[in-house]
Amino acid sequence: MSSRDKILDAVKKNQPKALPLPLFTSVDHSVSDPLQRFIRTLGSIGGTAIETHSWEDIEFHLNERFLKEVRWVNMVPELGNIKGAPNGADPHLLENVKLAILKGHFGVTENGAVWVTDDQMGDRALPFICEHLAVIVQSDSLVNTMHDAYEKIGQAEYNFGTFIAGPSKTADIEQSLVLGAHGPKTMTVFLLSIHE
Amino acid sequence: MSKDTLENVRSSDHATLADKFNLDEPRVDWHDKTLWFIRQKRDKAAAQTPEWEQLRETASQIKNNVLSNLHSYLVEFELNAQKNGITVHWASNAAEHNSIVHSIIKKAGVTQVVKSKSMLTEECHLNDYLKGQNIDVIDTDLGERIVQLAGEPPSHIVLPCIHWKKEEIGELFSKHLGTPEGNSDPQFLTTAARIHLRQHFMTSRLAITGVNFAIAETGEFVVCTNEGNADLGVQLADIHIACMGIEKLIPKRKHLGIFLRLLARSATGQPITTYSSHFNRPRKGQEMHIVLVDNGRSERLASPDFRNALKCIRCGACMNTCPVYRRSGGHSYHYAIAGPIGAILAPGLDMKKHADLPFASTLCGSCTHVCPVKIDIHDQLYKWRQVIAKNNLVGNTKKSGLKGLNFILSHPGLYRFGGNVGRWILKNMPYVLNNRYNPWYKQRDMPDIPKQSFNNWYKKNRP
C-alpha cells in the first residue's frame, strides 16, 4: 500500500465524529477616517502611506524620495513618464533594482497590509528583491479587516498573491527591530483618489 | 556561553538542562524579561481587537472541524493542488519525508539549497539528514542562520535565537562572516547577514519552505514571514519544495481571515506578518512540490485526550507566557518544539524519550489562556503525567516522593504529627531540610513558619 493510502486510511479510521464549521460574524469595524487609520497603522509597522490626488502627484513624490536611486522598475502604465522595465525572464537580473513601483488591489486598515497578485508584479521576485517598494492603491479600495479582505478577494484566480505590510524586517538580534532584513528597506503606499 | 550542541541537547532531561541554564542567573532574568515583554505585546494586540475571544473560539471550532473531516480535506486539497500544477507527495514518517526531499534535490542535481523556517523539517531533522547526503542547507531566517552557524537547534519556534546576546552574535559573525571583532550593533549585524544570505538566494536553484496554512478549497498554501526570506528563496529558485504536516489544512480561503488576524498578534503582537504569501501555481518553468507528512499525526487523531494538540498554528504564545520556559530556556526541552506545546507534542512521538517534558510545568494554565486556537495545553500536560506514570516512566525520586506524600496525606494523624515536627524543625534546625540533598530548595527561599497549624488555630478559635 502506498504511503498516501496508508495515511488516508489511518486518518479516516481515527478522525472523530464530524463537527460543523462555525459561523463567524465580525463586529462592525468601520471607522470614520479609514485613510488616516491606514496611514497610522502602516506607519506603526515601519512603512509610509501617503495620500495623493493625481498620478503627477505620485511621480513628484517618487522623484523627491528616490531620485538618487539608480535603477527603477515601473509596472504601472499610468505613470508613463517613469521608464524602467524588467529585463527579461530571469528574476536574478532584478538584483540591482533600487525602486519597484507596483499597483496593489486594496489595503487593509486594521494591519496596514496591501494585497498584490502576480499579474501586478511583472516578476514574482520583484516586490521582494528590490531595495525600495512603492505600491499604489485606490483610496476607496480600503477595507477594514482581513475578513473584508477575503470577502473582496472571493474566488479570484491568481497564481501567486501576497499581503505586504511594510518593509522586510527582523528583530532576531536581541529584539532590536531592523528594517530591511532580506527584502525592501522601505515600503511606501500611495493612496490615490482622483477628484474630477 | 556553553555550547548546546545537538548531541548535548538530546542526551539529558529537562531538569538537568534547566539547571545548566540556571547557572547564569542574570542571563535567566534577561531571558525571562525578554519573553515577558513579547507576551505583553501580545496582550496589547489582543486587547485592541474587540472580538478577540470570538476569533479564538471560531479558530478553535474551524480546527475541530478540520480534524473531524481531515480525510476529505486532504483528498480535496490534493486534487486542487494537482490541478494547479503542484506535485503532491505523501510521507508516513520523518525518514520518508527526508528521502522524498532528497530525491527531488538529487534529481535537480544541486548541492546547495536555501530553506526558510519550518518546524516540520526540524521535527524530521532534515538538515542533519541532508548534511549526511552532502547537501548544504542554508537556513535563511536570520535567527535560524545564527543558531545554524553555532551548530545549535533553535530554542524557540518564532524567535530561534532568543537565548543569544548581541555580543555573542557579533563574535559568531566575526568568526563565520568576517565582520570586525567587537561590533555587536544589531543593525550592522543584520546588514552583514543580509549581504551573506543574498549571495545564497542568488545562487540556490532549489528552495525549501514550511507551510502555515493549506486551503482544501483552492489547493493553495500560505507562508508567513517578516523577513521575506521564504519569498526571496522561492521566487529566485527553479524548484520550490513546501513541507507540511497533514494538520495544517483549513477548509476555505475565507478562513484565512480568522487565522491571519490571530497568528501574528499571538506571536509577536504585530497586526500581521510583513508577508503572507499565497502560492497557487508555480511560475512558468518552475517546479512546485508539496510534501504532506503524517509522522504520528494520524495516530494522535484517535486520542480524544490528546488530538487537540494538532490544532496548533505554531505562534509560540504559550512559550512566551510560560514561567518554566522563560526560566529554563528552549534547549532544556530537547525537542524541536519547546515550551508547553512541545511538552504535549513530543511524548506523542516518543513517550519514553520525552517522559520528562509534561513535568516541566507548574500547571498554571497560562498557556491555555493565550492559545489562539484554544488547545487545552495544561490539561493535556496533566493527562500526559498520568499516562507516563501508568507506563512506569516516572523517575524514582519523584515516584517515591509522591508515594510518601500519598501515604501521609491519607493518614490524618500522621499528617498532623508530621506538620508539628516540620514546623519545629524549620524553626530550630532549618539545615536539616534546607540542604543540597533536598531538590525543593533549589532556587527557593525558606517559607515563613506559622506559629501553629490551621487545625490548632481552629480548635482554639471556633465559636
Image (tube, coloured by chain):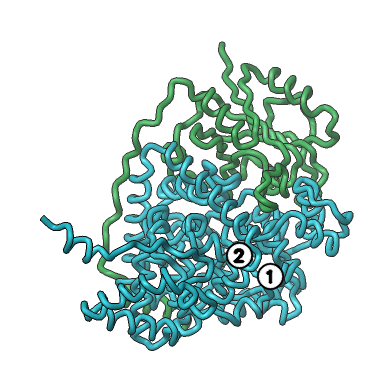
Chain colours: A green, B cyan
Q: Residue furthest top?
A: A196
Q: Does residue A141 appear in the picture of this structure? A: yes
At horizontal 45% and vertical 56% (from top left) the residue drawn is B215
At horizontal 71% and vertical 67% (from top left) the residue drawn is B148
In the rendered image, the vertical position of residue B256 relative to residue A189, given as above or below: below
Q: Residues within 10 Å of mark 1 (few under 14, many from 20)?
A: many
Label 1: state its secondary structure. Answer: loop
At horizontal 49% and vertical 71% (from top left) the residue drawn is B441
**Quadrant in which the N terminus of chain B is drawn:** bottom right
- In this rendered view, identify the residue nearer to me: A96 or B355: B355
* Left or right, residue B447 beside residue A175: left
Label 2: state its secondary structure. Answer: loop
**Which amino acid type corresponds to the residue marked 1 in the rendered image?**
Glu
- In this rendered view, identify the residue nearer to me: B453 or B132: B453
**Which amino acid type corresponds to the residue marked 2 in the rendered image?**
Ser
Give the percent coordinates (x, y) of residue A21.
30, 54
Q: Quadrant of residue A96?
A: top right
Q: Quadrant of residue A70?
A: top right
* Left or right, residue B4 beside residue B445: right
Marked residue chain, label 1: B
Label at residue B152:
1
Q: Which residue is mark 2?
A: B155
* Tags 2 and 1 touching, CB below 8 Å: yes
- In this rendered view, identify the residue nearer to me: B123 or B361: B361
